[in-house]
Image (spheres, grey):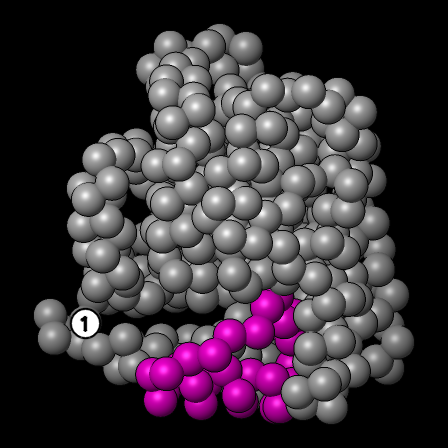
Amino acid sequence: MRIALLSYSTKPRGGVVHTLALAEALAAAGADVTVWTLGRGGDRAFFRDVHPSVAQRIVPFPEGPPDETVGERVLRSIATLREAFDPRPYTVVHAQDCISANAVGRCVRTVHHLDHFTTPELAACHERALTEPHAHICVSRAVADELAAGWGLTAEVIPNGVASERFADPDPAARERWRARLGRYVLTVGGIEPRKGSLDLLEAHALLRARHPGTRLVIAGGETLFDYRDYRARWEARAAELGVDPVVLGPVAEDELPALVAAADAFAFPSVKEGFGLAAMEALAAGVPLVVRELPVLREVFGHAARFAATPDDLAAALALALRDDDPERRAAGRELAARHTWEEAARRHLAFYRSLG
């Protein structure tokens, strides 16, 4: 079986992490796998090394003009990948996002989560990427139900895998370096953007400081296709009003991330829209107390292993409990939950699904 997995970027975003890990697991199971993506900003490689059993095709994507809009960049992304991609060598063409799905047309599509865009080009991209593929996969039942209710589409549910061993046993020296640099901290991974609930987390952090004045808020990640400068400016202005100064690390090197996660005193995941929550599951693998947004999908995925919060006040209160780490049974349940989600099982289920398509 020859499989093309397509993504839109080389950067460390959740969908890209998923694509590479799935590709390696499929190759380990005996499939012939090629990952296709766009090399934005001159990138010639992914954010991490990829196992040599996986072929890589990184299509150059030069910077556009300074006044290029998000919509124009999306259309140019689709056109660039479409021009380069040849589906003929592959048994299965599997797109992981709306840009790659629009570029290849008829394909298998993983719908990680459903969005509501106001940019016309993005809204059209999102819609076509749901209706044109001939088969769908979702990483949670909640998203599959949303897809069925909104579009009448049936999706196979195959949860994410998790590289739990990387996060369960990080380099102790690297962990201590993060602790020495940052002290006591609440971590979130995913950058500053609306979908990640960044403003709510900022409000919660200000409330939390009254109870735990020495605890910092640390934000890692943030590479994205979209332009969130206005939201980031609002976030920075609000931080100044609240008198808080979070640590914004930006993208963190792949080999440093497990230690950063493991050194945290709590992990916050207040996203307003998610399909699974891979970064949060990695925190559980590291044994870090987890607080997530009260969403059906996160209830489904995390169950009793996480604390749930609906508002900034709730989030601050749940983080205060997590910082006391008074629930070792919850921590053990989190480690066990993360360990059950393997990429080997995800690959096995993907291969079975591909074969069922005939």
| Pointer 1 local density, CA inside 10 Å: few below 14, some 14–19, many at least 20 | few
**Percent position of residue 231, x then y:** 27, 61
Residue 275's place in the image compared with 67, above or below, is above
Q: Where is residue 318, by image quadrant? A: top right
| Residue wearing tag 1 | 64
Which residue corresponds to the image point at 37% horizontal and 45% vertical from the top-left?
203
Q: Which of the two residues, 229 or 233, is positioned nearer the viewer here?
A: 233
Residue 269 position, x and y percent, is 53, 46
Quarter assignment of residue 62 = bottom left
Q: Is residue 124 above or below residue 257?
A: below
Q: Could you tell me if residue 116 is visible in this image?
A: yes
The quarter of the picture where the C terminus appears is bottom right
Q: Residue at x 43, y 22 (%)?
A: 212
Q: Looking at numbered disc 1 in the image, what kind of residue is underneath it? A: Gly
Give the farthest residue toward the left.
66
Residue at horizontal 38%, vertical 32%?
A: 217
Residue 12: tell me if it is visible.
Answer: no
Q: Is residue 119 found inside the magenta-colored segment of the image?
A: yes
Q: Is residue 292 above or below residue 180?
A: below
Q: Position of residue 149 (x, y in %)?
A: 72, 85
> From the viewer's perspective, is 14 left or right of 8?
right
Q: Residue at x 68, y 31 (%)?
A: 285
Instruction: Give the residues in magenta.
Output: 107-134
